[in-house]
Amino acid sequence: MNSNHEVISAFLDDEPFEPQALADALADPAGRDLLIDFVLLRHVAQPPETAGVVTPAPAARRKRPLYLVAAAAVVVALLGGYQLGQRQAADASLRPPAATRVVQSEPVWQEVGGVR
Amino acid sequence: MTPVSNAEKLVALYQGRLHRYLGRACGETELARDLTQEVFLRVSRVAIPVASENQLAGWLFRIARNVALDHYRQRSRRPEETLDGVDSAKGASQEMTAALNQALSLLPHLDRDVFLLREMSGLSYDEIATACELTADAVRNRIHRARVQLREVLASSLTPLRTSRIRRTASRYE
């Protein structure tokens, strides 16, 4: 193994390196193979949450589409109205019906005075 | 770099990286959690040095390394526990994980730590140098040597990967 290939490790690790030394190392087929194997080794060594995963920037709070909010409001209103209607209908069935006409009845007996 | 003087900040900054390093160093996820706790317990017993974030990383990982070394010593007294029973990583196959752990166990302790501090925790060569009490040049040399040795041991495992599709690993370890 060529000790000049150390530059490949430095390159892979984002450490300072001499560009010419890297060019020389990669001009050698063995150096190119080494780079590929080092990348594979990293892929194997690192846990899946870091290996080869481009972590997204902290997600900005996404705005919910307005139509979704409106649809949700309509559904809530409909359900609320339905519930209210159900409750009122139940109350109404327990109440006596309102009078629609007045029936006048004549007394069927007569008071007889002086008899005791 | 801004100085980090607060233990809570330290935990927030390095907990994940410590856990990954200790996980591969000891080979068990659950144990790594305990060892990470042990690191922060030790940190809580001493004054956190006023230093830049880079220097502090080296200081913290030196403690982590000592915790790992203590664990190795304890385990060496109990030879029935081996790296064969390690947890498998989700991405790599169980066989590959076992092969990697086996290959890592063949490396000299210092080379293995240098490699793990770089690959699992993303420490810079300077930070590793502080953690392992080496020069940056020595770190550079040892990391390369460790990789070459691992490559030789894992040659048969790496060959199939050459035909698969992978992404270049981004330098993100947070």
Image (cartoon, coloured by chain):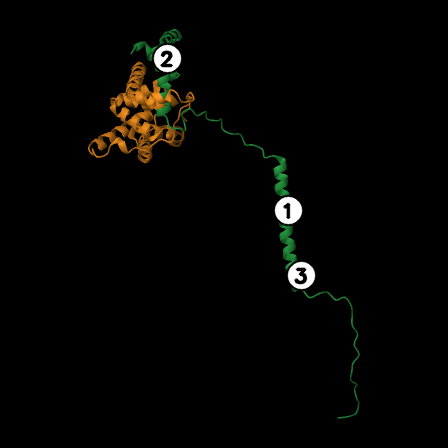
Q: Circle 3 is placed at which residue position?
A: A92
Whole-percent x, y for residue B72 in the image: 24, 30
For disc 1, the neighbor class at 10 Å (few under 14, some 14 to 19, many from 20) is few
Q: Earlier in the sequence, mark 2 or mark 3?
A: 2
Q: In the rendered picture, chain B carries what hue?
A: orange
Q: Which amino acid does label 1 sit on?
A: Ala
Do labels 3 and 1 touch, CB within 8 Å? no
Q: Mark 2 lies on which chain?
A: A
Residue at horizontal 65%, vertical 54%?
A: A85
What amino acid type is highlighted by mark number 3?
Ala
Q: How crowded is mark 2: few (under 14 residues within 10 Å), some or many (20 or more)?
A: some
Label for residue B106? none
Chain under disc 3: A
Q: For the view shown, which residue lies furthest in the bottom direction?
A: A116
Distance from Cα at disc 1 to Cα at disc 2: 67 Å
Element class at badge 3: helix
